[in-house]
Image (cartoon, rainbow, N blue to C red):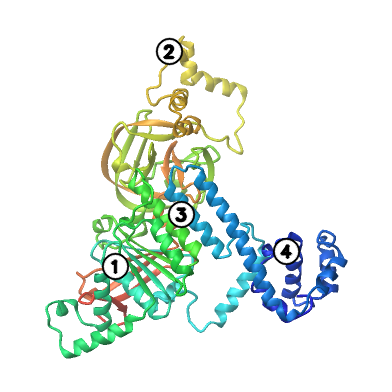
Amino acid sequence: MMLSAEAIADVVEVLQPEDFYRAAHGRIFETLRGLYARGEPVDVVTAVEALKRAGILEEVGGPLYIRDLVDQVPTPAAAAHYARIVAQTALLRRLIRAAGDIMEMAYGAPEDPERVADEAEQRIYEVARRDDREEIVRIRDLVDQAMIDLEHIQNREAPYAGIPTGFRDLDALLSGLQRGNLIVVAARPGVGKSSFVTNVARNVAVAGHPVALFSLEMSRWEIGMRLLCGEARVPWDRIRNKRVGADDWSRVVQAAEVLHDLPLSIVDSGNVTIVDIRAKARRMRTSKQGLDLIIVDYLQLMTHHRRVENRQQEIAEISRSLKLLAKELDIPVIAVSQLNRDPERRQDKRPQLSDLRECVVGDTLVWLADGRRVPIRELVGTRPDVLAMSPEGRIVTAKSDLVWEVGVRPTFRVTLASGRTIRATADHRLYGASGWVRIADLRVGDRVAVARCVPEPGDPIEWPDLQVALLGRLTPQALATARGVTKVDLRSRFAPSRALIDEYAEALDDDGLRAWANSDLFWDRVVSVERLGDEVVFDMTVPGPASWLADGIVTHNSGAIEQDSDVVMFIHRDDLDPAKKGVADIIVAKHRNGPTGTVPLTFLPELTQFRNHFPGEG
């Protein structure tokens, strides 16, 4: 590299500083690469000066060692060949490290062998992708990559930055499907969810992008017939009833030729798990054909690789796993989701983002990080710091993302043995003994988590001693002591004590019970669940802990699907309106990095196909 600029260009495309066995060589390579990137000359003199300015010249061997490195090079013409040798050796070292880690995990007698197998596959996949990078990235590296990406966007021939769906107005709104994004397509049954994503799969494959369609509802035969009939523009009923003319058959043959070599793969296993999808997607991504888009149809039919007591918790874990898969493979993932019946209760029946979420009534007290408890209706439009529950069962502070009014929804009231109550929608989730549980699924006698203690506020209020003394006289414990009642006479009516749980944990050698005993949670008992009328409800998102305290009750952040997604699209058809017959609205209700809006598409029910809509079409 210090002898030829052409050699530098060949080497920097192949190697990273961590590929060198000796750390000193990696530091020298990084310095030379920096000189080259800044357009400065690269030779022995400039290299020594750059290493001296960085304060690492003696650390890497000194100026004489740098000169010796140059003298030992037979010819710079073989630089690319030498770089490949270094890269291949580094790959083997990473593979050895990964294999050692896998052996250690396997010998550890894990409780979940499938999870270990998945982690082992991921480690090997990361080695193959040369993804053994540091998690800490310097801002200058991010800026350099951003400039490269912007230059690529400006010079590209395609009008969109992402993968085009083939629907003109939708691509204009989204700028195509972006890599690393989780896109949720949601609708009520019978609206055309599967048809829409199948059309997207076909359009993306026609554009030359490899697609994997995981269908848990339709068989591969059904998908093939839909694609063939749609491409040929011949209704399936006509084929099934043997009413195909010569022109129809000619179009079918031509359609078969178009579809035959498309880079479209279909998996129609009815019991596919997220581990199956991840394993197949990784293999496709690293194959010769590659993989640019994953479609899962649909989310609620998927199962998790391990047993999860609560179905809502299982869906949340699957949703999160799909988002992580999109980031890992750096490709968009489309997940189809089925909506609840809330849209049918509205007059216009249009789906809303709140249909993917669960909400609470306006007087629900949100416990803020400063110790105040404020009705959620008073927090609309703000992003307050709140108290939340960590995965370890600790009460921590967290930043909320948004608080807003959802609208009128049917509500329930849950009453606990301690006297606490919460009013919320049926799908709102509280933290129970086996994880998150919907209010509609709660039963009398179930246990839910309540904050036993909370962190001290950052800015506590100072009270005079007399005021504190008065408060102490008014507390139940002080009043009881004044009447000669001690803790010895008391028994918990709401939940077993932490000491008792800890005794059980030691006797049964149960880590789960130990976690309960040492957490910040108190397990209150449900005494009633009542159905109420319709009320105005509100919602709040809390990234990270994905929870908050509703007057001390641990309540879920809300819809996991909506939270994990980058884009949420609803499909809405109003066939009762003559002016909208044959038109389907694609409602982009959430777009993390861009605008939202509604895009009309033409829907052809006889072909189960969506097409671009033009003004004046019925």
Mark 3 → mark 2, Cα distance in angstroms? 53 Å
Number of callouts:
4
Give the number of the disc on residue 235. none
Foreground mark, 3 or 1, reads 3
The residue located at (67%, 78%) in the rendering is 10
Give the number of the disc on residue 118. 3
Does the residue at mark 3 contact the one at mark 2 (Cβ under 8 Å)?
no
Question: Who comes first in sequence, dot 2 or dot 1?
Answer: 1
Report which residue position mark 2 lands on: 489
Mark 4 → mark 2, Cα distance in angstroms? 70 Å
Question: Who comes first in sequence, dot 3 or dot 1?
Answer: 3
Helix, strand or loop status at disc 3? helix
Indicate left or right for 148 with 395 as reference. right
Mark 4 → mark 1, Cα distance in angstroms? 51 Å
Mark 3 → mark 1, Cα distance in angstroms? 29 Å
Give the number of the disc on residue 194. 1
Helix, strand or loop status at disc 2? helix
Instruction: Identify residue type, mark 4.
Output: Gly
Helix, strand or loop status at disc 4? helix
Can I make out residue 595 in this image?
no
Foreground mark, 3 or 2, reads 3
Question: Who comes first in sequence, dot 4 or dot 2?
Answer: 4
